[in-house]
Amino acid sequence: MQAVSTIQVLSHHIAPFQARIRLGVVVMAALLLAGCDQLVAQLGLPDPKKEAATAEADGRAIGSACRHSGRALEDCYALNPAASKASVFAGWREMNDYMTQNNLAVVPSHMPSPGVSLPAKDAAGGGHATPPPPGGKASSESEPAEDAVPPRRSRRSRDNS
C-alpha cells in the first residue's frame, strides 16, 4: 500500500471548498454588477447617455409641436434656444411629413409670436390692458367676445341635466 501524505489528504478536502468560494465570489460579483445602474440612480450620479437621449427626445418633441402649431422653424429655434437645432429640425420634419401624409391641418397657436411683446399691465386694475379689437370698437364688459370660451360647468350640473 502506498502511504498517503497529510498534504494530499488535505488538498482533496480543500479543493472543493476553494471551488465553492470562487463560485460564491463570482455569483456575488455578478449580482452586485447587475444592480450597478440602480446604485448610480440612487446616488444621483449623472448618466451622459441618458441625458443625451432625453435632450434628443425633448428637441424632437419641441420641433413636432412647433410644426403642428404652424410655427416657422426659425421661430421655434428662437423660442427654444437651449434645445439642439438638429433634434428640433428632425422633429419638425417628422411632423411635417406626418401632417402631409395624413392631410392634417395646422392647429394655430394662441401664443404671440416671438417678436410681439405682451401688453403692459394696466396701472389702475393691475390686470393686463386689452388692445382694441381690429374693428376699432372696444367691447363692453357685458358683451362676450366672439372667441370667448364659455364657463365650464361642474360635473354635478352635467349629470343633472
Image: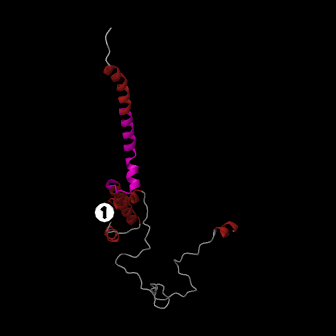
Q: Which residues are magenta?
A: 22-49
Dominant SS of magenta comes to helix
View extreme (top): residue: 1
Q: Does the magenta portion include 26?
A: yes
User: Left or right of 112: which side holds 138?
Assistant: right
Q: Which residue is mark 1?
A: 84
Residue visible at 33% across and 71% down?
75
Residue nearer the viewer, 105 or 58: 58
Picture quarter with the N terminus: top left
Tell me, what colour scheme is on the image?
Answer: secondary structure
Tell me the quarter of the picture where residue 33 sits: top left
- Residue 60 x/y as whole percent: 36, 60
Q: Does the magenta portion include 60?
A: no
- Residue 99 x/y as whole percent: 40, 60
Residue nearer the viewer, 42 or 109: 42
View extreme (left): residue: 86
SS type, badge 1? loop
View extreme (bottom): residue: 124
Tell me the quarter of the picture where residue 88 sits: bottom left
Residue nearer the viewer, 45 or 53: 45
Whether 23 is drawn above or below 86: the answer is: above
- Residue 128 x/y as whole percent: 46, 84
Residue visible at 39% across and 61% down?
61
Picture quarter with the C terminus: bottom right
- Residue 20 x/y as whole percent: 38, 30
User: Left or right of 146: which side holds 23?
Assistant: left
State how many labels appear: 1
Whether 86 is drawn above or below 144: the answer is: above
Label 1: how many Cα within 10 Å (few below 14, some 14–19, many 20+) = some
Whether 76 is drawn above or below 140: the answer is: above
Label 1 amino acid? Ser
